[in-house]
Image (cartoon, rainbow, N blue to C red):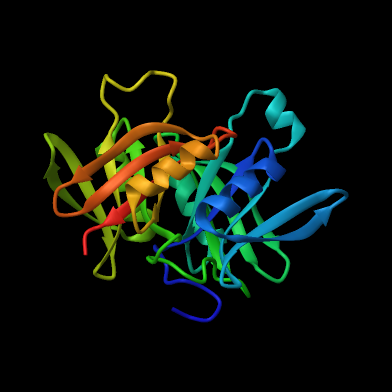
Amino acid sequence: MSRDNYPQGHFCWVELCSTDWQKGKAFYSDFFSWSAVDQPIGEGVYYTMLQKQQEDIAAMYQMPADQQAQGVPSYWLSYIAVDDVDSKTAAAKELGASIVHGPHEVPGAGKMVLLCDPGGAMVALWQGKGHKGSQRKNETNTPCWFELATRDMRASAEFYQQLVGWHTELRPMDGMEYTVLSIDGEEIGGMLAMNEQWPDDIPSHWMVYFQVDNCDEQVEQAKTLGAEICVQPIDIPDVGRFSVINDPQGAVFSVIQLQG
């Protein structure tokens, strides 16, 4: 990858919008042994870099009051690297996405756009210009996998294939169809179908997985820190052991202990 940007089509950053930034910062600092560096972005408003050994892993910020008033829950947002945000924004619109915010410059860092894909899942595109994104990936306490839960697998696959060139491969997994996403020969994420067992009020969404050394120990720690466990630790044959966690402020994420 270049100094300023991940290769196009690779996930490059994750960001937490929290209903309680201070408590959320304490939770993740304890849970992942991250340090937190607050960067002022306005009057009493901060963009907090979450770091492992002084290197940026992710970020978080306080949810604006108007979003909280609308009942928006805390959420993790995933970013995909692109070579040119403006052209990809135009392409995304033509492919049926709706633009939520941007494109806009982040001074000294890059350019981004926030969009909803045709299935309704929110995702961001990032063109690094000084800050490529996560400085560590695919190691303990860093992002390692990104998963789209969608109600229309075919439409979602076609959208991202055309937008960023992902390759899709259907693989059977525990009685369900799972689509593995790859680019440049590297597997980067997956897609699963939201069937009738999913409540109607849960929209299509991206889930970030963080790699951990011991899934069960991590889950027990999450409980002591006030989190709820949505999916208890469970094995994925030939992959590893994972769990889905709802942090104390309501943001959902996964942890996974990969097979050696």
Quadrant (top left, top right, bottom left, bottom right) of the N terminus: bottom left
The residue positioned farthest toward the bottom in the image shown = 3
Q: Residue at x 21, y 65 (%)?
A: 260
Residue 174 appears in the picture as rendered: yes
Q: How many marks?
A: 0
Residue 108 percent across, percent down from the top left = 71, 71
Q: Residue at x 39, y 34 (%)?
A: 119
Q: Which sits in the foreground, 35 or 196?
A: 35
Residue 62 appears in the picture as rendered: no
Q: Which sits in the foreground, 90 or 236?
A: 236
Q: State the image quarter where residue 229 is shown.
A: top left
Residue 183 percent across, percent down from the top left = 29, 65
* Left or right of 255 in this view: 33: right
In this rendering, the answer to whether 119 lies above or below 44 is: above
Q: Residue at x 34, y 37 (%)?
A: 149
* Left or right of 44 in this view: 8: left
Q: Which sits in the foreground, 96 or 187?
A: 187
Q: Residue at x 28, y 44 (%)?
A: 191
Residue 89 percent across, percent down from the top left = 53, 53
* Left or right of 125 in this view: 167: left
In this rendering, the answer to whether 2 lies above or below 108 is: below
